[in-house]
Image (cartoon, grey):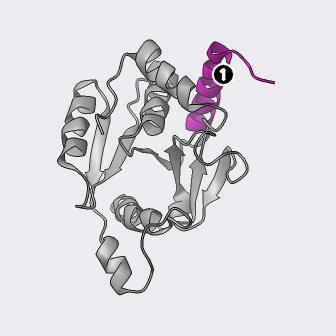
Amino acid sequence: MNRPLREKIAYAIQRMRRMWNASRSKVRFVAFSTGKDSLAMMAMLYEAVESENEEPICLYSHHGLEFPENLHYLETIREHGFQIETVRPFLGYFDLMRRGIGFLTLYDPWCVPMSVGTGFLEWLQNRNLSSPRDAVMFRGMTGSEYGKKYHAEFETYRRLDLPCFNPMLGFTRDEVLQIIRERYGLPLNPL
């Protein structure tokens, strides 16, 4: 049954608040790609924890192959009050290819998590974590892109062995755009 958007938002924010509080003993962060899904996720999480006076850290992985507009967009989002940190993967796309790990395809885009993930792992190590399991990644992935068929609300991000919370799987692309524009008044990445 398809619930009204306001109910879906309220439920997602409640789940985010509950997960944020339940994972206090872990290093918590948002995986921010500069896309619409991670933007909506980030805005809703900030709303969920605003009473705690916390500003979740949002990690953006700068792998060197993105368009300059992404980096300008990061500055725009920072101006809206989001705490964004940029990490650099120690393995880039071409490093992965040279090691025979592969390259981005629509069928198997697993080098993306590997190149992004190496930056996340290094960031976690700099916080003296002995294992990625001592962290929780909040990820804005909607059902319109990968679907509930492949992901669960709470799962282990296998390539990094990192607990991952996906509270937006029940949202459609149009709902995400509506949340960004109407609820938060945030600009979308021009790309």
Q: Quadrant of the N terminus?
A: top right
Res. 91 visible in picture: no
Extent of the magenta region: 1-21
Residue drawn 75% across the image and 23% down it: 2
Say whether residue 7 is magenta: yes
Residue drawn 51% across the image and 61% down it: 106
Say whether residue 48 is magenta: no
Secondary structure at numbered mark 1:
helix
Q: Position of residue 175 (x, y in %)?
A: 56, 24
Residue drawn 44% across the image and 78% down it: 102
Q: Nearer the viewer, residue 23 or 89?
A: 89
Q: Position of residue 47 (x, y in %)?
A: 47, 21
| Side (left or right) of 72 relative to 145 | left
Q: Nearer the viewer, residue 81 or 105?
A: 105
Q: Position of residue 159 (x, y in %)?
A: 54, 68
Q: Inspect the image, locate mark 1, and give the three-letter code of the amino acid beneath it.
A: Lys
| Side (left or right) of 117 relative to 19 | left
Q: Which residue is mark 1?
A: 8
